[in-house]
Amino acid sequence: MAQGWIEEIYNNSGKQLYVQSHDKTHNGTINGKNLDGGGWVEAPTGISKLTYFGVPWFASSNHYKLFSFDKKNGVKIYQSDTGGNNWIYYENMVTGKTLLKQEVIREGFYHAKLTVDATGGWVIEVVNVQKAKSINFKAVLETTGRVLEKAADVIIVVAPLMAA
């Protein structure tokens, strides 16, 4: 099973982004602020540096990260190996409805950045893989099965959920 690390947030939204982590380990830090304990931590506009900020493995709904502009609506992420592939799931943090899933490597390590655009939509982009062969960007819309092959398309899908 692959370990995923998000190392930077590029917040170009003009709004404060809030992040919460629920994981046994690898909650991480944002600009030196620790996410242990489950409280909200701010990721201001501009570039935030992250350390040990893992993409959690799904386990009894207890391991995930939340991203929100208002601490009420937003997106929940985790990764899970299903159907022979490893995916990062993007869910509505209020309803639990899966919005989309983004394929990542199954073994080794991957390093990523999270980019938030002016609309508030965001995407996790893998920028480096170790001990595995890189794969092309691919996300699948849960409702229609449509395959998204560009990170910009994921931003468009996520933006309305963050604005809810």
Image (tube, helix red, strand yellow):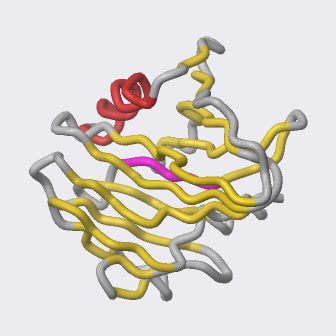
Q: Is residue 75 left or right of residue 63?
A: left
Report the span colored magenta. Answer: 74-78
Q: Position of residue 97 (x, y in %)?
A: 57, 36
Of all residues, the one furthest to the right in this rendering is 84
Please say if 162 is above or below 34.
Answer: above
Task: Name the dominant secondary structure of the magenta segment.
Answer: strand
Q: Is residue 58 left or right of residue 115?
A: right
**Quadrant where the image shows the C terminus:** top left
Q: Nearer the viewer, residue 34 or 150?
A: 150
How many numbered marks appear?
0
Q: Nearer the viewer, residue 161 or 137?
A: 137
> Can you tell which quarter of the image residue 101 is in?
top right
Q: Nearer the viewer, residue 116 or 92?
A: 116
Q: Is residue 115 left or right of residue 93?
A: left
Please say if 109 is above or below 35.
Answer: above
> Can you tell which quarter of the image residue 145 is in?
top right
Please name the residue shown 51% across and 52% down the image: 76
Q: Position of residue 21 (x, y in %)?
A: 50, 72
Please name the residue shown 24% across and 38% down the image: 163
**Quadrant where the image shows the N terminus:** bottom right
> Can you tell which quarter of the image residue 22 is in?
bottom right
Please name the residue shown 31% across and 37% down the image: 121
Residue 87 shows in the view: yes
Q: Position of residue 143 (x, y in %)?
A: 59, 18
Q: Nearer the viewer, residue 93 or 127?
A: 127
Residue 61 shows in the view: no
Please say if 148 is above or below 70.
Answer: above
